[in-house]
Amino acid sequence: MTPGYDKALYLLPFDHRNSYVSGLFDFKPPLSPSHSEQVRDSKQLIYEGFRKALADGVPTESAGILVDEEFGSDILRDAHGRGFVTAMSVEQSGSEEFEFEYGAEFSRPIETFDPTFAKVLVRYNPEGDTALNRRQADRLKMLSDYCQRSQRPFMFELLVPPTRDQLARIGDSKALYDRRLRPTLMCMAIRQLQDAGIEPDVWKVEGLSRHDDCERIVAAARHDGRGAVGCIVLGRGAGVARVLRWLTTAAKVEGFIGFAVGRTTFWDAVAAYRAQTMTRAEAVAQIARRLRNWVDIFEQARLSRAAPVQ
């Protein structure tokens, strides 16, 4: 099966687990039944925001959710029943090295919940630890092969954290790393993973501030007969202004089919609801407004791809 997914894709990701539980709730594992229920209810609130965004005009055929099975199983079932695009994370939360949440039985929850996409988050620096990269690639090949066999789209969230040497080269500036080194390293990582036999249908990548860097990412993702592979830009928990710049830049490049912006969409609203400074309805409405704003910005910028030069 030739990899590819080139339809518009506007995802609301709320599959965060360890960082979500500790950052928003200050809970520590193992969670009590009461704590687990609070986390599940907060994810239900986010899902309500997603559904309100659809009711307010976000296109149902393009919108989707990315949620975990641990706290979002009821949401996954409901969304599947309504015909929404769904993605489910299969990686072990909080692990620096990619591991399956259920080890060798990684396909079991995929078969149970039947999401549109099987999704992984992987930290992979092509100039990093060679043995680590090889171990991760071996596991990822298993998932890629499974998705190919079962004809299920595969979504790959690629994070490229800097090595100490890379940061030292640019004066320990993460901002300079993001601008000068990360785009090239992302392209290298995509090619290395493809060479290892890993074939995502959608690459979920960190935001880029330059048009030509977005073009380079698409070229890497689509080279050698992969012309239908799509790219989406993630929000990385950044501020609204930065997310808008990333979306606008990516949307103008053919091959970027959408975005997956999570924490910037829901975090403030969920925190305010927990602090009782927002009602549930207000929090739901804020999430819906943010999601619709991302969609509007992306679609407006995408129109400029075909705009005639004056």
Image: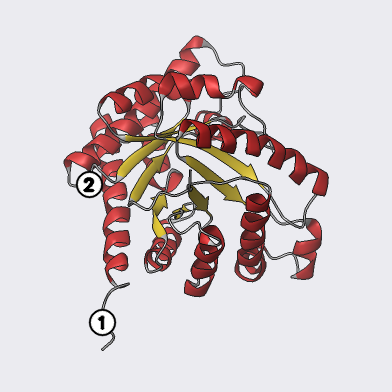
- Residue type at tag 2: Pro
Q: Residues within 10 Å of mark 1 (few under 14, many from 20)?
A: few
**Identity of the residue drawn at 17% across and 39% down:** 55
Q: Quadrant of residue 178?
A: bottom right
Spot the residue most to the top.
Answer: 33
Mark 1 in CB contact with mark 2 (< 8 angstroms) = no
Q: SS for tag 1?
A: loop
**Identity of the residue drawn at 58% across and 36% down:** 145
| CA distance separating discs 1 and 2 | 26 Å
- Report the residue marked by disc 2: 59
Q: x%, y% of residue 68? A: 48, 28
State whether residue 10 is above or below residue 15. Answer: below
**Quadrant placement of the C terminus:** bottom left
Of the image marks 1 and 2, the number of the one nearer the N terminus: 2
Q: Quadrant of residue 300?
A: bottom left
State whether residue 68 is above or below residue 141. Answer: above
The answer to whether residue 168 is left or right of residue 196 is right
- Residue type at tag 1: Pro
Give whichever of 181, 273 is nearer the camera: 181
Q: SS for tag 2?
A: loop
**Identity of the residue drawn at 42% across and 64% down:** 250
The answer to whether residue 249 is left or right of residue 160 is left
- Report the residue marked by disc 1: 308
**Identity of the residue drawn at 35% across and 24% down:** 75
Kindly tell me whether residue 39 is visible in this rendering: no
Q: Residues within 10 Å of mark 2 (few under 14, many from 20)?
A: some
Q: x%, y% of residue 205? A: 52, 54
Kindly tell me whether residue 151 is visible in this rendering: yes
Q: x%, y% of residue 295? A: 29, 54
The answer to whether residue 49 is left or right of residue 13 is left
The numbered mark at residue 282 is none
